[in-house]
Image (cartoon, rainbow, N blue to C red):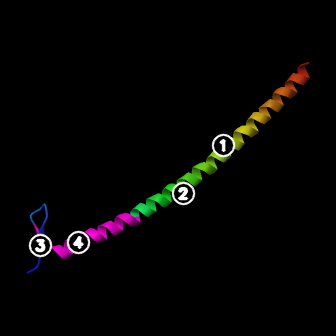
Amino acid sequence: MQQVQLLHKGEEVPKDNALQKIESHEKLCRIMQKQTQDDIKSLRADIARIEKIMLTSAGVLITGMAGVILVLITKVW
């Protein structure tokens, strides 16, 4: 006689089939978790690149504005 497991819907599913469904679901979860972790790593790399661009741009702007201020000061004096 084949062992069965009752589901919450009242259906009877063979125990082997239920175990297979659980294992396939776990495998899918592992694959999706790996993809999520890869996406997070990719986003972190993109954020780091954008931070470097922003810091470089801010440094160039501050240096440029300081240069303009110095030129204006020397012209006025």
Q: Residue at x 11, y 72 (%)?
A: 4
Examine the structure image and report whether residue 17 is included in the region drawn in magenta.
Answer: yes
The image position of residue 8, as x and y in percent, is 13, 60
Q: Which residue is mark 3?
A: 4
Q: Report the magenta residues as a range.
A: 11-31
Give, as a three-letter code, the residue at label 3. Answer: Val
28 w.r.t. 59: above or below: below
Name the element at disc 2: helix
Give, as a three-letter code, the residue at label 1. Answer: Met
Q: Specify whether 47 is left or right of 11.
A: right
Examine the structure image and report whether residue 15 is included in the region drawn in magenta.
Answer: yes
Alpha-carbon span between mark 3 and mark 2: 45 Å
The image position of residue 21, as x and y in percent, is 25, 71
Q: Which mark is residue 19?
A: 4
Name the element at disc 3: strand
25 w.r.t. 68: above or below: below
Where, by quadrant of the figure, is residue 55 drawn?
Answer: top right
Which circle, 1 or 4, is nearer the viewer? 4
Q: Specify whether 7 is left or right of 67.
A: left
Name the element at disc 1: helix
